[in-house]
Amino acid sequence: MDAIVVDRLSYRYQAVGREILKNISFKVAPGEIVALVGLSGCGKSTLCMCLGGIIPHYLGGMLDGQVLINGKDTKEYRVARLALEVGLVFQDPDTQLFAPTVEDEIAFAPENLCLPVEEVATRVDNVLDTLGITSLRKTNPNHLSGGQKHLVAMGAVLALEPSILVLDELIAQLDPAGKRIINEILVDLRRRGKTILIVEHDPEAVSIADRMLVLEEGRLIKDGETATVLEWWESMLRHKYGCKSWTISGHAAGPE
Amino acid sequence: MAYIDIENVSFCYPGQSRFVLRDINLRIYKEGVTAVTGANGSGKTTFSKLLIGLLKPVKGRIQLNGKLLSSLTLAQIGRQIGYVFQNPDKQLFCETVEEEIAFGVRNLGLPPERVTQKVREVMDYFELSRYAQAYPLSLSAGEKRRLALAAVFALEPGLLLLDEPTTGLDPYRKQLLGDYLDKLVAANRGVVVISHDQKFIDRYATRLLRLEDGQFIEE
């Protein structure tokens, strides 16, 4: 069974508003890492929210077509139920952090699954250790830097051990060490059969993906193997938008 | 002359014993692009908030254009340093995109025609014109980032202080931003960029500062 099936998905935030997603279809197999790219405002984050069921359950709007998460239609399952299968890390971590300490933040979801206390403690320890943030255990998430907040948000989702992860620009605000840690985690998760969808702008960040999807103005315009699609995307950025090569890959070009 | 002169500045948050910044001595000039890098949590954002007076040093002093920062109001500082927050949600508050940009410009006391012209200019440059009447917080993250940048750039301050300005920007918009910084520098204005975006820094920075263990290392 496919981990994610998106079938002829269209969406608008308001009944009379602009269509943000236009007839999108794709599938993701278990154990695949898929990168989603596209210019700002093309619908990447909206699509992420459809995968987690936030759309249509919390944001309403007009949704056509279907999203299946491990075979479950997101329209028919509550977000809390879907969260056991798909973990979302939002673009802005402030929207998902609320507990008084980092430890509580990470323990919150496993505690709500009514897991045994020892199991919760083990998961929290493991997550803190894996992400290299054990020293922040007792800190209030509000007092953390932007990048640290991202790591904690990632930790809170990892502690749920979902089979699918959706990461919306997680890597952008991390320092090189943080980027490396997340990369290693993602590769390790893939080895363990987890499915991952990442939204990123940086070609280095998308390079670990097996497949790459390109969205343009709400349409899925490319879906294929990463190296091929990345090359196509770079060429499109260069020719259609006049980007110089430094923005995408290769070495930074000096000033012209 | 240094635009910002930082002398023996130390800072720790109330109730905490760890000093985020220790005995910083640094001069920032109104020229080129100064990049500030450092690990997550090393104090980059804290440092930037000290420069615009949102946080006050525990020790030492900061002078802006020859005047003690502590003697200036936030408005006086804001006229000389344009600050764009790491999280653009923190600075957007108007009903429409157009109004968001016009707000600051109008407060500079410019005549209405000049305000309209300035707003149109930055909206066009950052490709926000199609959203002129949209509610800022309904925009995507990348669009909000562009709006926050545009609103501050429209004020034409002497020095720009940008906290992770490329986050959320696609490669094309990143280049628009970079080209704009080049123009500012050519017009003898200074830019300080806090960033983890190594390629962006490599391409645009003229001075590199790395924050490590509460102190700056010039690279």
Image: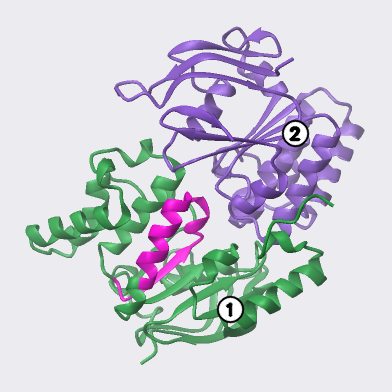
Chain colours: A green, B purple
Q: Which residues are magenta?
A: A162-187
- Residue found at x 22% / y 48%: A104
Q: Quadrant of residue B31?
A: top right
| Residue that badge 2 annotates | B32
Q: Is residue A5 magenta?
A: no
Label 2 neighbour load within 10 Å: few <14, some 14-19, many 20+: many
Q: Amino acid at mark 2?
A: Gly
Q: Position of residue A165 (x, y in %)?
A: 38, 70
- Residue found at x 59% / y 55%: B168
Q: Is residue A126 left or right of residue B197?
A: left
Q: Amino acid at mark 1?
A: Leu
Q: Position of residue B143 (x, y in %)?
A: 66, 54
- Choose between B102 and A204: the one closer to the eye: A204
The kind of secondary structure element at disc 2 is: loop
| Residue that badge 1 annotates | A213
Is there any visible trace of residue A125 in the rendered image?
Answer: yes
The kind of secondary structure element at disc 1 is: strand
The extreme right residue here reads B113
- Choose between B211 and B67: the one closer to the eye: B211
The correct choice, above or below, for A91 with respect to A233 in the image is above
- Residue found at x 14% / y 59%: A122
Q: CA distance from mark 1 to mark 2?
A: 38 Å
Residue depth check, mark 1 versus mark 2: number of the one nearer the observer: 2
- Which numbered marker is on residue A250? none
Q: Is residue A184 magenta?
A: yes
